[in-house]
């Protein structure tokens, strides 16, 4: 029986990369039944009154899983991030970004294999801002013990289940002694109570960024609060070729949304040249998650074959224009299908 999945195409290049990802996942025999729903500017264009319609939230709540393309977020003005709202509303508290070097993708580094685990619901992204008086604004950083312990447990559990050896907590507790101080204290206590088999370290975030660009192979799983984790995810993506080759997942207790973490790139929308790899890779993460949570090994088999297909395609020079090649969006998807 097919597994129901919500497909949120998103804005800009979103529909194109979503179609390509869907083609690859279907060709791998993942046995998914897609229900298309909208978020972002696409929702307004589809006649919805809200950027994140209740109907979309209800579908994700019912099916428990979604694959999502990029949604536009204005800078400095306009509406709040649909991505942040989606994560907070569905309590998708763990953002997971695996980042690894890939043959055929040019980069300054080799041998990078890092996973960012980011607290996804609070911190400065709580969005509590006020204009105190003209020319003076404040932003409130929120940290709770519950959320800090929950994300720490997730990071250590993730490391153990995947055979990873070390968790590094990035923080700024030397300055923010209450919020970041709480974050590292909770991580330390969770480690001592249940995960002493995992190597644990605490690194001040600015020094950690320097160490990352000096030698990213020194890190394994990185645990961070919301803002640091967001910045680090893009920094680490730059170590392996950019956001076009890095997937993302937002995971909660009752469901998960897997997404391309790059922007909606409206300047190239409709031209058929966008790179769908990040969303395909996110689809692989989704299949592995379905395999684990639904106890269905055929999903893991499909995921393994798709991953092998894009590894081979990249190594053999079948790449999109952003990576120095000539393949268009669906042409690249076809190259993956050939190699399944």
Image (cartoon, rainbow, N blue to C red):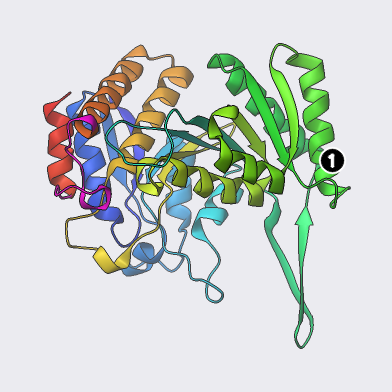
Residue 120 in view of the camera: no
Q: How crowded is mark 1: few (under 14 residues within 10 Å), some or many (20 or more)?
A: some
Quarter of the rendering occupied by the N terminus: top left
Q: Which of 135 and 220 is in front in this view?
A: 220
Q: Nearer the viewer, residue 140 or 295?
A: 140
Judge whether 233 appears above or below 187 on screen. Answer: below
Instruction: Name the side, left or right, on which 285 lies relative to 9.
Output: right
Residue at (75% x, 86% y) in the render: 135
Instruction: Name the side, left or right, on which 182 lies relative to 17.
Output: right
Judge whether 226 appears above or below 149 on screen. Answer: below
Coordinates of residue 93 in the picture (x, y in percent): 62, 40
Residue at (17% x, 29% y) in the render: 27
Residue tagged 1: 182
Judge whether 292 appears above or below 180 on screen. Answer: above
Coordinates of residue 329 in the picture (x, y in percent): 18, 49
Q: Mostly what secondary structure, the magenta segment?
A: loop
Coordinates of residue 267 in the picture (x, y in percent): 28, 68
Query: Start and end of the magenta stretch?
Result: 315-328
Residue 274 in view of the camera: yes
Question: Given the current orientation, which residue lies at the most extreme right position?
Answer: 178
Question: Given the current orientation, which residue lies at the most extreme bottom position?
Answer: 134
Residue 225 inside the magenta-drawn segment: no
Q: How many numbered marks have been drawn onto this rendered protein structure?
A: 1
Coordinates of residue 323 in the picture (x, y in percent): 26, 47
Residue at (42% x, 63% y) in the render: 72
Q: Which of 305 and 300 is in front in this view?
A: 305
SS for dot 1: helix
Residue at (17% x, 41% y) in the render: 332
**Which of the 4 quarters of the picture holds residue 146?**
top right
Quarter of the rendering occupied by the C terminus: top left
């Amino acid at each position: 029986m097919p597994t129901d999945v919500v497909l949120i195409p998103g804005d800009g290049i979103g529909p194109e990369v979503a179609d390509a990802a869907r083609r690859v996942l279907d060709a791998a025999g993942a046995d998914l039944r897609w229900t298309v729903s909208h978020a972002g500017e696409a929702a307004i264009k589809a006649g919805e009154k809200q950027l994140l319609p209740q109907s979309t939230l209800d579908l994700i709540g019912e099916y428990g899983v979604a694959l999502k393309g990029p949604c536009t977020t204005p800078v400095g003005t306009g509406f709040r991030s649909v991505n942040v709202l989606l994560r907070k509303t569905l309590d998708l508290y763990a953002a997971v970004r695996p980042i690894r070097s890939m043959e055929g993708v040019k980069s300054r580094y080799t041998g990078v294999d890092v996973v960012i685990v980011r607290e996804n619901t609070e911190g400065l992204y709580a969005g509590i801002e006020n204009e105190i008086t003209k020319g003076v604004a404040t932003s409130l950083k929120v940290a709770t013990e519950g959320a800090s312990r929950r994300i720490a447990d997730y990071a250590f559990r993730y490391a153990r289940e995947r055979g990873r050896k070390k968790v590094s907590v990035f923080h700024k507790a030397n300055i923010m002694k209450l919020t970041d101080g709480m974050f590292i204290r909770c991580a330390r206590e969770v480690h001592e109570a249940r995960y002493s088999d995992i190597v644990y370290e605490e690194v001040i975030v600015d020094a950690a960024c320097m160490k990352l660009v000096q030698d990213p192979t020194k890190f394994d799983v990185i645990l961070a609060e919301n803002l640091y984790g967001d910045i680090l995810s893009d920094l680490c993506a730059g170590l392996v070729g950019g956001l076009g080759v890095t997937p993302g997942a937002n995971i909660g207790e009752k469901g998960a949304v897997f997404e391309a973490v790059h922007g909606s790139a409206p300047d190239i929308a409709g031209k058929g040249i966008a790179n769908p790899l990040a969303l395909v890779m996110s689809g692989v993460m989704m299949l592995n998650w379905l395999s684990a949570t639904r106890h269905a090994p055929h999903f893991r088999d499909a995921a393994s074959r798709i991953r092998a297909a894009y590894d081979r395609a990249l190594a053999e020079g079948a790449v999109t224009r952003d990576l120095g090649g000539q393949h268009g969006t669906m042409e690249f998807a076809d190259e993956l299908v050939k190699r399944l």
